[in-house]
Amino acid sequence: MWFMNKIVNPVVRIILRSPMHGLLSGSVLLITCTGRKSGKAYTLPVQYARDNHAIYIVPGNAEEKTWWRNLRQCPDVRLWLKGENITGEAEVLENAEQTTMIIHGLSVFFHRFPTSSKNHNVRTDSNGQLNQGDIEREARSMVVVRVKLEPYTPSKGYEPR
């Protein structure tokens, strides 16, 4: 964890904010959230999958991480996505009432990152379709962060894809 936080993450932040962001920005973005106790801004690189006007983030080893817990009380976030500063509202999907949304988020994420689906023992059939039962099983124990992006405004210079 120390190596990731002190070495890897700072290097990734530098690359994502540079003209070379294209090396990583198709799968990694920077999320800035506010600490629920400290009030400080924290910026972290995270892997993401996009679905229309939403970004899905699946925190790896969520039980060991604290950053996503801040979003329960402070849902306003800034994203550095593909060289653009974007604002959005985050929602932590983590309980049984949100199972349908968790399943959707995991499906979007696992389609984008098939290796991640394999790491979670989500099988695919011969047509490359994810096994729905496996996703439903994983949805009972995983946290998904959904960031709803603000609509495009010309002054922000960002156009949804």
Image (cartoon, rainbow, N blue to C red):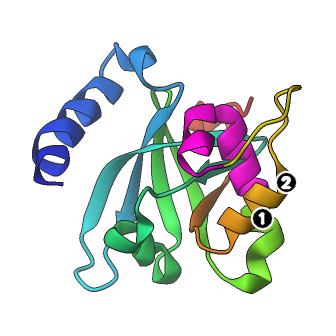
Task: Name the residue beneath numbered marker 1.
Answer: 136
Q: Is residue 73 visible?
A: yes
Q: CA distance from mark 2 to mark 1?
A: 6 Å
Q: Is residue 114 left or right of residue 11?
A: right
Q: Quadrant of the N terminus?
A: bottom left
| Residue 4 lies in the magenta-colored region | no
Residue 36: horizontal and vertical position, in percent?
34, 82
Q: Is residue 110 magenta?
A: yes
**Mark 1 secondary-structure assignment:** helix
> Looking at this view, is 4 or 152 the one in front?
4
Residue 23: image location, x then y, percent? 40, 15
Does residue 147 appear to the left or right of 12 in the view shown? right
- Tell whether label 1 touches label 2 (CB within 8 Å): yes
The span shown in magenta is 104-121
Q: Is residue 157 left or right of residue 39?
A: right
Q: Position of residue 90 (x, y in %)?
A: 58, 65
Amino acid at pointer 1: Glu
Up/down of 94 relative to 43, above or below: below
Q: Which mark is residue 132?
A: 2
Which residue is at the front of the view, 67 or 141? 141
Q: Residues within 10 Å of mark 2 (few under 14, many from 20)?
A: some
Q: Amino acid at mark 2?
A: Gln
Residue occupying the point 62% across, 77% down: 94
Return the residue nearer the eye: 55 or 123: 123
User: For residue 145, what is the image quadrant?
Assistant: bottom right
